[in-house]
Amino acid sequence: MRALAAASLAGAVVGLVVGGVGGRLAMGLLARLNPEDAGRITDDGFRIGQLTASGTLNLLGAAVQAGLTGALLYLALRRLALGAPAVRVASLTLGGAVVVGAFLVHPQGRDFRILGPDWLPVLLFVALPAVFVPLLALLAERWLAPGSWFATARLRYVAPLLLVWVLAGLLLPLLGLAVVVGLVHQRLAPTLSTGARAAVAWSARVLLVALGLWALWGLVGAVRAVT
């Protein structure tokens, strides 16, 4: 519960800053460079060049959701990465940028067909996760440290911070799944031998590398089609 609260709050904060503020700045830059497309609807339902309260709130809400999802993934993968801390963060950053970029960049999207220069929307959509991951790692590791407030404060003060998931609305089932997986891991991990734990960890790493290569292939193909 302590680790989940620390990672969740870190993900919400970094997601709000990178996805919300950074996303709004990226959209503003694209709108400024493409004044002829003002008023057109983007893939995400926003009007190009128009700053509205409802649109901003929707963007901030989506940024918090993305941040919370990213926090869960980071919490699950942080111990699988190999090497020194900087190397682990670099590998997670690269993987996150490639996978999220492959998911967001698609040649059929209006954002990539009508907004120019052609390379800029691609760069921005890949840059956002590339900035999010190291900032999340920096803040989350600080709050996950043994001497942090999250680790030393009374649980009744820490657990209510998970209410940040209420702001995410439909993501509440994802929080429940994370709790269940965490409890199962806590019960099963001590019963496995060192060899079995190593085999599971390396199997997960192989799957992650395969996913990264598949995502990279898709991203390269999408970038070629867009540019």
Image (cartoon, helix red, strand yellow):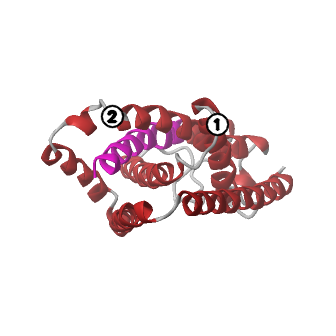
Decide which of 177, 192 is in the foreground and name it: 192
Image-quadrant location for residue 126: top right
Position of residue 216 in the picture relative to residue 137 (left or right): right
* Residue extent of the magenta highlight: 1-25
| Callout 1 secondary element | loop
How many numbered marks have been drawn onto this rendered protein structure? 2
Q: Earlier in the sequence, mark 1 or mark 2?
A: 1
Q: Main secondary structure of the magenta part?
A: helix
Q: In the rendered structure, find residue 83 and report the number of the disc placed on it.
A: 1
Which mark identifies residue 61? none
Query: At x 55% / y 40%, what residue is drawn?
Result: 133
Q: Position of residue 169 (x, y in %)?
A: 32, 63
Q: Measured from the top left, where is residue 19 in percent x and y?
A: 49, 43
**Residue that numbered label 2 is attached to:** 146
- Amino acid marked by disc 1: Gly
Q: Dot 2: within a 10 Å radius of its alpha carbon, few (fewer than 14), some, or many (20 or more) residues?
A: few
